[in-house]
Image (tube, rainbow, N blue to C red):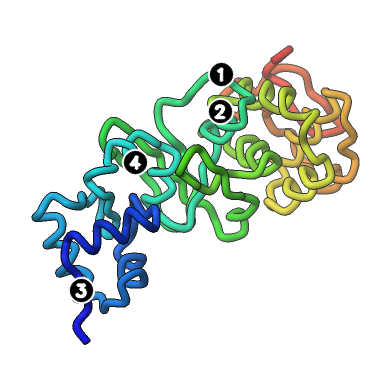
Amino acid sequence: MKKNLSTTYIIRRLRALGASAFSTREFQDLFGVRPEEAYRVLHRLAGADAVRRIRQGLYVLVAHDDEVLGHSLYLGTRLVEPSYVAFWSALHFRGWTEQAPRVVFIANRRRSGTRAVGAHRFRLVRVSPRRFFGYEEAREGPFAFPVAEPEKAIVDALCAPGLSGGAGLVASALGEALPSLDLERLLEYGTRMGSRTLCSRLGYLLERSGAAAEPIREAASAAYVKLDPAGPRAGRFVARWRIIDNLGGA
């Protein structure tokens, strides 16, 4: 029996399912159609101004496009999948910094570069499979999206301060976050990243804040590394963590 794929039926079903944004593959699964038919139907819907394509293979219902396009975190994680909100954007989402980035940082395993959708700009950051872990679903209103777990948000930021507002902001965010973090998980994630520089930064900042960090000392750098990679190789040399504290009191 031929499926009823009238525009009215499709829009009603998508609305009933809360699918205000969807991929071509999701459309195939929802309506039980083959790829070629899905592309044909979606082309027809776009021509009828019922859906809008925001990138190859990703569509929004026109009746909801303002709502979808207004939620940058949800939209960013739909640009490439799997992915999650990370770096500076994750620190801001968690409430550890009031400084909001001008772009939304999205960690993923496939793409790098900047994208623009509507008024929003996104920075896609490709990370290695080894470091692509530690994210969870968050929800704001009707939108669910993956975001770095609290401990992973800190670890990612320390691994790439330049993508996270700078080392000073990251150090401040860690201080804000520390009372609510699972310290054992934080240390585990730090070690799991496989970066001795990261472990030196993390261990030093934790102990400076009065937290125990001994379990990761063996994973720390054997050579001195800068706390702020963008700063000068000058400051206080801390032998225990092989850190050059070039942030001062930050």
User: Which label sits in the foreground, 4 or 2?
Assistant: 4
Where is mark 2, residue-wise? 92
Query: In the depicted view, which residue is nearer to us: 243 or 94?
Result: 94
Q: Quadrant of residue 87?
A: top right
**Disc 2 on helix, strand or loop?**
helix
Where is mark 3, residue-wise? 4
Give the class, few, some or many, for how many residues have Cα within 10 Å of label 4's Cα (few <14, many ≥20).
some
Of mark 4 and mark 1, the one earlier in the sequence is 4
Q: Position of residue 45 (x, y in %)?
A: 15, 58
Query: In the depicted view, which residue is nearer to us: 162 or 156?
Result: 156
User: Which label sits in the foreground, 4 or 1?
Assistant: 4
Of mark 2 and mark 3, the one earlier in the sequence is 3
Query: In the depicted view, which residue is nearer to us: 139 or 131?
Result: 139
Q: Amino acid at mark 3?
A: Asn
Where is mark 4, residue-wise? 68
Q: CA distance from mark 2 to mark 3?
A: 45 Å
Q: CA distance from mark 4 to mark 2?
A: 20 Å
12 vs 215, left or right, is left
Where is mark 1, residue-wise? 98
Of mark 3 and mark 1, the one earlier in the sequence is 3
